[in-house]
Amino acid sequence: IEVPNDPGNVIYVWFDALLNYMTAVGYGWDDELFAKYWPADVHLVGKDIIKFHCALWPAMLMAADLPLPKKVFAHGFFTIDGQKISKSLGNAIDPNELAAKYSVDTLRYFLLREIPFGGDGDFSFDRLEQRYTSDLANDLGNLASRVSNMVAKYAAGKISVQELENASTIEQEVYSLTEKLSFDKALARIWEVVSDANKLVDAEKPWELAKTDETKLLKVLGTLVAQIRLVTKLIKPYLPEAAEKLDKAFNADTIKKVEPMFPREIKPEE
């Protein structure tokens, strides 16, 4: 871009493009809005444009005496079944179509759990199906359905929720991993709670306790509800739709039965 009144010099096009980060959030036209959103907590960029965002952009901000982004994080690239995504191969995937088939929660979960954030990652329909069936439908969805049904059946939806001794520790671990953008590890930690809850169901067999020990039954169900409430709180940034359904069911005065959140028979492609 030619410098106005000085055609012997030019402005690199990236200079003009980078300014949009600030002008979009009020710089030069809304000081209050700009103060709210700048500096950015995390500046997310592609790994192939680090030069512009970690050299030219900071230099521009420093020259203007403006604060730098608090963190710059470069993400990796996707391949499809080991191949580069390209028009010639015809292997590009429309994320909107994929989300319509599996749900946005499913797609978000798969990408953040399967691929360490920041590294290159390979997308596979087979692994997406595996994560959907194993982690979401079986582990989380089936747990929520079983526990809500048992609380409704054996306690009329009313239960004294047990206190989890390690809840605050787990929360801090997950929040710390999230702050570090280690989303795969944060989700893995949350799923340890899901796994523990499923193991508790299998070990204690509440349907048998209902016949022999009502006191222990109610304690077990109270622990399970506490575990699900903790999971609900922790998955909100990752699976907001699922978290909302769990919240309505398990944080109500009377716990309600949860409809299948991740049906085993997924919606066919349109």
Image (cartoon, helix red, strand yellow):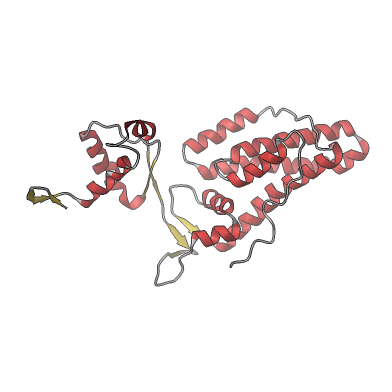
- Residue 71, position as x, y percentages in the image: 37, 37
Whether 269 is drawn above or below 99: the answer is below
Q: Quadrant of residue 58?
A: top left
Residue at x-position 73% and y-position 44%:
198
- Residue 32, position as x, y percentages in the image: 35, 30
Q: In this view, does 145 lie to the left or right of 63?
A: right
Q: In which quarter of the image is residue 87?
A: bottom left
Q: In this view, does 117 lie to the left or right of 221?
A: left
Residue at x-position 66% and y-position 39%:
247
State the residue lying farthest toward the right: 212
Whether 228 is drawn above or below 6: the answer is above
Q: In which quarter of the image is the C terminus?
A: bottom right
Q: Quadrant of residue 186?
A: top right
Q: In this view, does 23 lie to the left or right of 149?
A: left
- Residue 142, position as x, y percentages in the image: 73, 49
Q: Nearer the viewer, residue 151 or 35?
A: 35
Q: Which of 257 and 14 is in front in this view?
A: 257
Marker count (numbered): 0
Q: Can residue 221 be seen in this view?
A: yes
Residue at x-position 50% and y-position 59%:
95
Q: Can residue 70 be seen in this view?
A: no
Q: Nearer the viewer, residue 10 or 204?
A: 10
Residue at x-position 51% and y-position 38%:
178
State the residue lying farthest toward the front: 29
- Residue 20, position as x, y percentages in the image: 30, 45
